[in-house]
Image: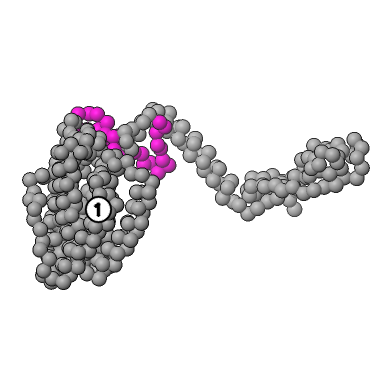
Amino acid sequence: MMSGGATRVIRSLVGPPRCFSTAAVRTIGTDSATSKIPNEAAGFFTLNPGKASERAAVTWIRFPAMGARNASTVALDAKVQKEKEKVETGLAGGVAGGTGGTDDEAIVSYWGISPGKVTKEDGTEWRWSCFRPWKTYKANVEIDLKKHHVPVTFLDKVAFWTVKSLRYLTDLFFPRRYGCRAMMLETVAAVPGMVGVMLLHCKSIRRFEHSGGWIKALLEEAENERMHLMTFVEVAKPRWYERALVFAVQGVFFNAYFLGYLVSPKFAHRVTGYLEEEAIHSYTEFLKESDAGRIENVPAPAIAVDYWQLRPEATLRDVVVIVRADEAHHRDVNHFASDIHYQGHELKEAPAPLGYH
C-alpha cells in the first residue's frame, strides 16, 4: 500500500490544478492564543476587522481541468524552443509582411515552418504578405471600354435591371464621394468570383471532373477585386457607418448571389457582367471628376504601386485607369461564361481565359 507522502507527491505531479475558495470559520474565544494561526493551516484572514473571532479559511479544491497544466507546460516548452532557435539561427527579428516588415521577434514554429523573406528585383525587402511579387502584373489598359451586352432574353433583362437598381442605391448613399463609392463597389464585386469558385469546386469534387480552369480564373477575379478594395480603403478611409453598411450589403448580396448561381449560373454570370459594366461607368465618372480638379490627384497608395508594377511617381488617376481596365476584363470573362451556358454547354467545355487581366 502506498504511503501518504508518496500519494501526495504523485498527485502534485499528475493531478489537475488547484483552485481555492473561502469559507467563514468562527473560532472560540478572542484571546491572542486562539487568534494565532499556525503556518500549517490554510491561510486565514479576518473577515470583519472588528471581530477577531471571524476569519476566512482558504480551502484548496481540485477541479478536473487537466488542460491548464498541460497548456502551461507546452507554452514553456515553446518558449524554450523559441529561444534556442533564435540563438542557433541568429534570428533577432525582421519578418517581412503586413505593411512593411518590422524588427520584432522572429516567428518560429515547432513544425519547422518559418516565414521566408522575399525581395524585389532590386534587392529591397518585399513589404506585402497578402500577395507576392509573382502575383503582380502590368494591366492592359488598351481594352475596349465601351462594349455592352444588349439584354435580349428575359433573364438578361432581369439581370440588367437588378444591377441598375443596385446602382441607384449606390448613387443615393454616395452621390459625389467617389472614393467611398469605389470602396463599396469593390466589396460587392469581389463576391461573385468567390461564390463561383466555391460552387464549381464542390461540383468538381462531387462529379470527379475537371473545371476547365474556371476555378482558377474566377479565383483570380475575386483576388483582383479584393486588391482593388485594399487599394481604395487607403484612399477613402471609410467611416464606422460605412463599414457597417458593408456588413449589411455583403450579407444580403452574398446570399442572394449564392442562391442565384445555384438556380441559374448563366443568370449569375450575366449579373456580374453588368455589374462590371457599371463599375466601368463609375470609374469613368471618377476620372472626369479628377480631371476637373474636384478630386485631388494624390500619390498612388504603395500597395497599388507594387501590385500593378507602377512607376514610383504614379498617382491616384493612374490607379483608377488600371482598375477600370481590370473591370473591363472581368466584364468580358463573365459575359463569356454566361454565353457558354446560354449555348447549352458547361464551363468545363470551354477553357477559361487564365491570366486575362
Whether residue 292 sits left or right of residue 247 in the image: it is left
Foreground pick, 269 / 169: 169
User: Three-letter amino acid code at disc 1?
Assistant: Asp
Q: In this view, does 92 lie above or below 196?
A: above
Residue at horizontal 22 percent and vertical 63 percent from the top: 162
Question: The magenta stretch spans which residues?
Answer: 104-131
Residue at horizontal 7 percent and vertical 51 percent from the top: 144
Residue 214 picture location, percent across and down: 18, 59
Whether residue 102 sits left or right of residue 21 in the image: it is left
Whether residue 142 is in magenta: the answer is no
Q: Is residue 109 visible?
A: yes
Foreground pick, 260 / 83: 260
Whether residue 125 is in magenta: the answer is yes
Q: Can residue 133 be seen in this view?
A: no
Residue at horizontal 78 percent and vertical 44 percent from the top: 56
Whether residue 2 sits left or right of residue 101 in the image: it is right
Q: How crowded is mark 1: few (under 14 residues within 10 Å), some or many (20 or more)?
A: some
Residue 199 picture location, percent across and down: 27, 63
Residue 224 picture location, percent across and down: 22, 48
- The residue to which callout 1 is attached is 171
Q: What element carries label 1?
A: helix
Foreground pick, 128 / 228: 228
Main SS class of the magenta portion in the image: loop
Residue 168 picture location, percent across and down: 24, 57
